[in-house]
Image (tube, rainbow, N blue to C red):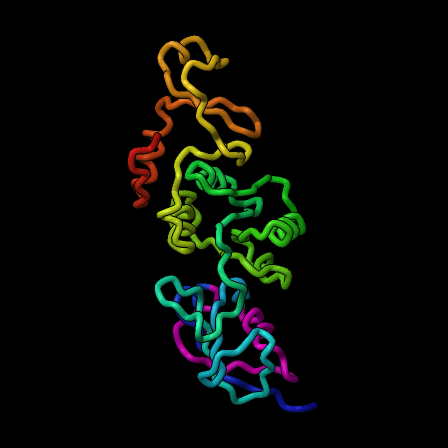
Amino acid sequence: MPAQRQCEFRFYEELNDFLAPPLRRRSFPHAFDDTPAVKDRIESLGVPHTEVDLILVDGEPAPFTRRLHGGERVAVYPMFECFDVSDVGRLRPRPLREPRFVLDVHLGRLANYLRLLGFDCLYRNDFSDADVIRIARDEHRIVLSRDIGLLKRAELTHGAFVHATDPRRQLREVIDRFQLESRIAPFTRCARCNAEVERIPAGEAVEAPPAVARNQVDFSRCTGCRRLYWRGSHPSRLQERLAEVGIDLGAAP
């Protein structure tokens, strides 16, 4: 039986969160058989390929398909938020021009928050993994998930593991990772069905409860499920809750 081959790996920044504790934030040897693709060895160590944006093998950019033969030094980097590495050799297609998301079944409250901030976000509590992958592929959406196995699926090109467990901190994490701060448009999308919300012209009759109709001037309606919206106290409460995690809605409508 041929002897195992070995190379040296080093993972950077938040990719270390996926590794076994003894392997974090240091270089370590990794043994393997045959000549596997570097993507296979990265995922065997627990890191989904959707989290990786740059691989250097012996200091040179390498694709996921690069074969390892033994003796290489492999450096693995996460998504770069502050540096332009476009000339270095990113591993996936260019970032999606308009960030749109599909979430797995464990992230319902995050989906609600994203919609309230105006982001196109598909979610149902009966989505299967196959549904999520199909939607992401067919509609060019980014998968948000806390399921590492889902994010390792070869069909996915755009996805992100959500590290936080509190929904508001999850929202903060997604906004930071995809640099969404300037795109926030509060209350322009329906929290129930994800369709856009449009203002109802002044003077147009609305079927609101009498007490609401007497005290409200501005109404909006979902273009999908036709749900009626008015200001009430919800925007103020949401502003306060999100301000606690550093998200400023400004003068929300």
Q: Does the rendering let one see residue 75? A: yes
Residue 109 is situated, as x and y percent measured from the top left of the image, at 48, 39
- x, y percent for residue 144: 52, 51
Q: Is residue 151 shown left or right of residue 230?
A: right
The residue at 46%/15% (across/down) is 204
Kindly give the residue lying farthest to the right in the view shown: 1
Question: Looking at the image, is 185 positioned above or below residue 11?
Answer: above
Q: Between residue 182 and residue 122, name the one nearer to us.
A: 182
Residue 53 highlighted magenta (yes or no):
no
| Quarter of the image with the N terminus in it | bottom right
The total number of labels drawn is: 0
Q: Is residue 138 above or below residue 207?
A: below
Q: Position of residue 238 (x, y in %)?
A: 36, 33
Q: Is residue 219 above or below residue 162?
A: above
Q: How far across and how far down the image is residue 23, in percent?
A: 45, 74
Residue 129 visible in this rendered orientation of the protein: no
Residue at left 55%, top 33%? 193
Image height check: is 163 above or below 78? Answer: above
Which quadrant of the figure has residue 229?
A: top left
| Residue 5 relative to residue 228: left or right | right
Q: Which residues are magenta?
A: 18-45
Q: Quadrant of the C terminus?
A: top left
